[in-house]
Amino acid sequence: MNSFTFTQATAVEAAVQDKAAHEGAAYIGGGTNLIDLMKENVARPTHLIGLKNLGLDNIENTPDGGLRLGALATNADTAYHPEVEKRYPLLNQAILAGASPQLRNMATDGGNLMQRTRCYYFYDLATPCNKREPGSGCSAIGGYTRVHAILGTSEQCIATHPSDMCVALAALDATVRVSGPNGERTIAFEDFHRLPGNTPERDNNLEPGELITGLDLPAKGFEKNFSYLKLRDRTSYAFALVSVAATLELDGTTIKDARLALGGVAHKPWRDKAAEALLIGQPATADTFRRAAAKVLEGAKGQGTNNFKIELAKRAIVRALKQATEMNQALDATAFQNSNP
Amino acid sequence: MSLITDYIGKPTSRVDGPAKVLGTAKYAAEFNVPNLLYGYVVSSPIAKGKITKIDSEKVRALPGVQEVFTHENVPNYAFLDRSYKDDVAPGGSPFRPLHDAEIKYSLQPVALIVADTFELARYAASILHIEYEEAAHETELTKHIDEAYEPGRGKTGYKPPKSRGNFGRGWKEGVAHMEGQFSHHAQHHNPMEMFASTVEWLGDKKLNIYDKTQGVFNSQQYVNKVFGLSKDQARVISKYTGGGFGSGLRPQYQLFMAVMASLQLERSVRVSLTRQQMFSFGHRPETLQHVALATAADGSLTGMNHFAVAETSQFEDFTENVVGWTGTLYDCKNVKLGYRLAKLDVFSPLDMRAPGAASGSIALEIAMDEMAYAAGLDPLEFRIRNYSDFDQAQNLPYSSKALRKCYAEGAAKFGWEQRTPEPGSMRDGNLLVGWGMGGGIWDASKQPAVVKASLDADGHLTVSSGTNDIGTGTYTIMTQIAAESMGLPIEAVTFVLGDTTLPESPLQGGSWTAASVGNSVVEACNKLGEALLKQAQKMDHATFKDAKIDDVQFVNGQMRLRTDLTQGIVLRDIVQASGEPKMEAENSTVLTKLEMLKPPKYSMHAHNAVFVEVKVDPDLMTVHVTRVVNAVAAGRIINPKTARSQVLGSVVWGISSALMEESVMDHRFGRYMNHNYAEYHVPVNADIHDIDVIFVNEEDDKVNPLGIKGIGEVGLLGVAAAVANAIYHATGKRVRDLPITIDKLL
Ligand SMILES: Cc1cc2nc3c(=O)[nH]c(=O)nc-3n(C[C@H](O)[C@H](O)[C@H](O)COP(=O)(O)OP(=O)(O)OC[C@H]3O[C@@H](n4cnc5c(N)ncnc54)[C@H](O)[C@@H]3O)c2cc1C
Ligand code: SF4
């Protein structure tokens, strides 16, 4: 870790200006990811801009019936917010499926979007990595790829975005609000994160200096039929091998509307609208779910040690959709997957 | 009559608990001695090759950096390999930190930066420029099986496994057979507390060394030999250890570095390792095993073949007893055993909780399950039919063996008789239910240990020995034993350990501390009792005038006449009458040492039987271990509470080995890639459900006077195999490569 200076910003504009004034500056939310990266010398910011005092930690209803999450609201406060619990239970489940209580108490919603991949090679300076050092090569390809992508990969990078929360946000069609040197703008969630392509060093479409100020959730929360299913190497406190956010709007047994997003499989939360289209208008049966699952994994490519994720993802999609359908019935077989102490 | 100072066998809370909870218990990296300098270790990014250039100019220019130590400027200390050998060093040539330009393994320490603050040293480490010339490395065990060799040298006490009978004939005699290859990957101990040494410079090469270790004397003798320091110059202290599991058996390189830097700079220096660097030394070796079993029509074993190949480093032959247990645990005439090592470009492996047996029992106990199925027998019934009542490997009777009780009591508690044998035949709603079992055997050993007992004029007893407590409960059980031996309330007894100025004791390992130090506590207290009796007789106390030591008893704070318990004298009064501030006695280890030279008369072992329930999601193949019953026969249990904790920890580790734990090596880099707690998975609370621990009654007057066998390791045995067997019972899938992660079941 290098030496750095620190300012605790008190206004969004000042924070943005401070960032522009310091080359190598970084915003810091809860620090749960950035500090780790600094300890490993993966991130070496010269100046840190604290965001805690920006007054961006509120969660409030919006006039259009949605909900606005301040970028500095903690993951814990967000998950347990009464409006989230009531109207966006999918988000509640997804957040609580991630990390540990201690981490969620520190982690912020903005930071969650911005957290970097957990690729082992990215974290270890002894191994080349295009994301860390463009052009140096991708060590993961041909290596140990348990936490790596099966969809949307490139020759340059096969990393995944590790967030659980973001998978739910993708399914819920959230909007990211940002402020930057050129003023304010909003970014649709599906346009926020990127695929690696030839620029794996870029995780998302935030412009230099831009600051996330909040997240807007539209009114529709799918609070009746939803499921967040996370499969991982232990019951809690591990990143997803595969996770699925599934939401349904049912008319009797017919699917009126559906959302399907996956985590742990791509460089971004993987939303598949073509698969959703296969669900809409169909009966909520295992067959329908299997067709949608097959669609999602159509172009999937294993990297060796992660080949199993293709089959696992299919089964997880079917299960998540089944759980979403059977919301009010006993979920015996899934009791363990959803226990998040 | 139950006496209030009878503590042995009673559940007793940890006497060191309050200090740990209140934070007054200090660990090696927490001694903030004045004017301390901080060291940070730089680790090699390559697995093999040599350092061609070190440019430390930029680092040295940083204000506050005191020194950059590399092989270029670390003085040559001791010349001979012998000087670098610690008490548990395997055969070969021990690794010397910062010795030459050669890189022998990935994460090898290549430099130590010493600075005024930890943060500065850490930063300096990140900009130190080192160039390497890489050489091709070999880290893949499966590619080196053919070159594997029988170790001719090993750790002290290593005996090559002995075959008996004729396996080929036994195999032919059999009517049912099984044969399988088993493997598990490397595991790193990863105790919570990371390795650290704080060396306090007292002037004139006199050092107080606060070290994370499982044996202060082992660290001390290493420092003595390597740096040519006398015992007076190097006092090693380790009062609390945040977990060891074997990792602290050998002095780790931070000890060398901290002492070296302190001597060079004539300052106090601390060196602590990072979590990532906890993957830079010994580990449980990756091991490949082959087991073949055959049975006669009645289910009796006619032949057993167990062969193992394990990794070792290029410079030492790390040996452990992987296959030997197979020749002891079950009754069989024809047993063929083999054990080989393959040299890889890794650091030498190191004993890890139940070394060898934990690995061997994975293969043996899964194989026994497979054999039971092949023979059409219930796995428990199969083991009972092959019960060994006599140790065929050593040709000795057992000093005691209550494994039958483990089987019976464990099975009853678990409800084993309700098991239907067919895989996939048991369900809980949609979930597949599997019941599996396993078990194991571990040495009951004892080492010479010196203990001093000292009673002061206030009636407070201080008992001391330079052993360690790595979380096992040593402080507590020694206090109990001493309190009962001297007949004092437990509050009036303090046990002191972890300091080389105390009487010499072996390092804490091998599950031998309770027996070794415990019996010595009794001996020391007995000697103190004799002294007290003599003093009482001088006091002209009519009651004890003609009493011999066997005529008196120490209870409830008094010395009493056995024949008339109403006649007693308060111990404190005896000390006061002596005119001295305290009365002391120390046991002698002469008899123990003599005993160890003689061939043993008995086979002395602890045993266990484990019953496991798993529930498996039939589509997603997620596995949960919902119930475990572990029945242990380990002689006398001094403290059922701390002993239970030992077994609970073992069960958790067994589940970890079965389902998640592995150090994943990327062979292209020769480097463990999941070298942190986020990716090196061990169970969290949510993974652990019901665990029942049973200590079956096992009286043993032959193993040692207290009848203790030790419970630090035996509880781990068979757990991982039982989980694997339960998974087979649930799913019909036989996984022989551990850990059994979700991908292996899909
Ligand atoms: C051991 C461990 C296990 C974990 N397990 C999981 C898991 O299972 N699932 C999961 O989803 N997550 C998991 N996490 C990740 C955790 O959710 C993230 O670390 C956290 O959400 C990051 O938020 P933060 O506020 O601490 O971000 P910080 O560390 O403060 O920042 C992260 C990045 O975001 C940038 N940033 C922060 N705020 C803003 C903003 N408002 N605008 C623009 N940029 C910003 C920073 O500059 C930095 O680059 C785990 C983390 C750890 C350490
Ligand atoms: S997958 Fe991406 S992050 Fe990982 S090594 Fe390759 S380039 Fe780096």
Image (tube, helix red, strand yellow):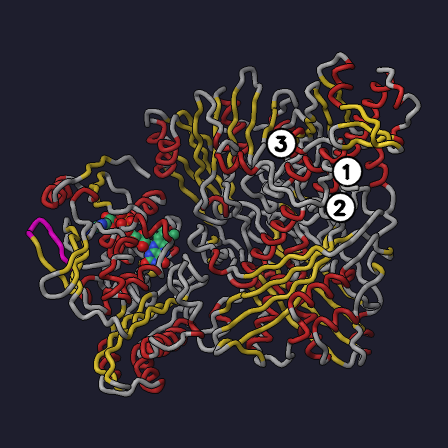
Q: Determine if marks 1 and 2 fall on one subunit.
A: yes
Q: List the residue tagged with mark 2.
A: B708
Per the image, label 1 sits on a secondary structure element best described as helix
Q: Residue furthest right?
A: B546
* 10 Å crowding of disc 3: few (<14), some (14-19), many (20+): many
Q: Is residue A155 rendered to the left or right of residue B592? A: left
Whether ligand 1 has any atom under 8 Å from the Cβ at mark 3 is answered as no
Q: List the residue tagged with mark 1.
A: B519
Q: Are marks 1 and 2 in contact (CB under 8 Å)?
A: yes
Per the image, label 3 sits on a secondary structure element best described as loop
Distance CA(mark 3)–CA(mark 2): 22 Å
Q: Position of residue A210 (x, y in %)?
A: 14, 51
Q: Amino acid at mark 2?
A: Ile
For the question of whether residue B550 can be seen, the reply is: no
* 10 Å crowding of disc 2: few (<14), some (14-19), many (20+): many
Q: Nearer the viewer, residue B253 or B412?
A: B412
The numbered mark, 3 or 2, whose residue comes first in the sequence reads: 3
Q: Amino acid at mark 1?
A: Asn
Tell which tag, 1 or 3, sits nearer the viewer: 1
Q: Where is residue B34, by image quadrant?
A: top left
Image point 73% across, 43% down: which residue?
B156
Q: List the residue tagged with mark 3.
A: B498
Q: Residue furthest left?
A: A182
Q: Position of residue B352 (x, y in %)?
A: 61, 50
For the record, the magenta segment spans A176-183
Magenta: main secondary structure equals: strand
Q: Is residue B189 rendered to the left or right of residue A148? A: right
Q: Quadrant of the image for the N terminus of chain A?
A: top left
